[in-house]
Image (tube, rainbow, N blue to C red):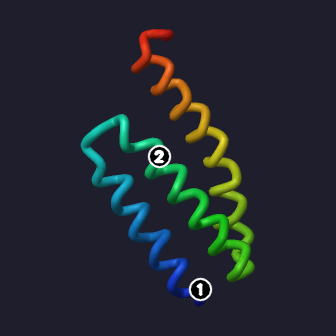
Amino acid sequence: MPVDTLGWAAAALMVATFSCREARLLRPLAVATNLAFIGYGLMASLAPVLALHLLLLPINLWRWAECRRLARGHG
């Protein structure tokens, strides 16, 4: 996949994340966004983008797991 295409896909995922009205969909979208931007940051050698999304990924994974636990009533 060309670098620019991955960058635009990551940007589209970011817009989808910010546009999300359902909390249960927000975190998986955020994780997908982080993964896309990590790939983009690696391919384009963009250290700030890579660092930011490497930092945000575990936060989003943790919050997603938290949401899933709460949804099952194990909060």
Circle 1 packing at 10 Å, graded few (<14), some (14-19), many (20+), is few
The answer to whether residue 41 is above or below residue 27 is below
Determine the residue positioned at 57% across, 66% down: 36
Residue sitting at the far front? 72
Q: Amino acid at mark 1?
A: Met
56 or 24: nearer the eye? 24
The answer to whether residue 20 is above or below residue 51 is above
Rendering quarter of residue 2: bottom right
Determine the residue positioned at 46% across, 74% down: 9
Rendering quarter of residue 59: top right
Q: Amino acid at mark 2?
A: Pro
47 or 36: nearer the eye? 36
Determine the residue positioned at 48% across, 50% down: 30
Instruction: Read off the residue under disc 1.
Output: 1
Instruction: Read off the residue under disc 2.
Output: 28
- Residue 53 percent across, percent down from the top left: 63, 56
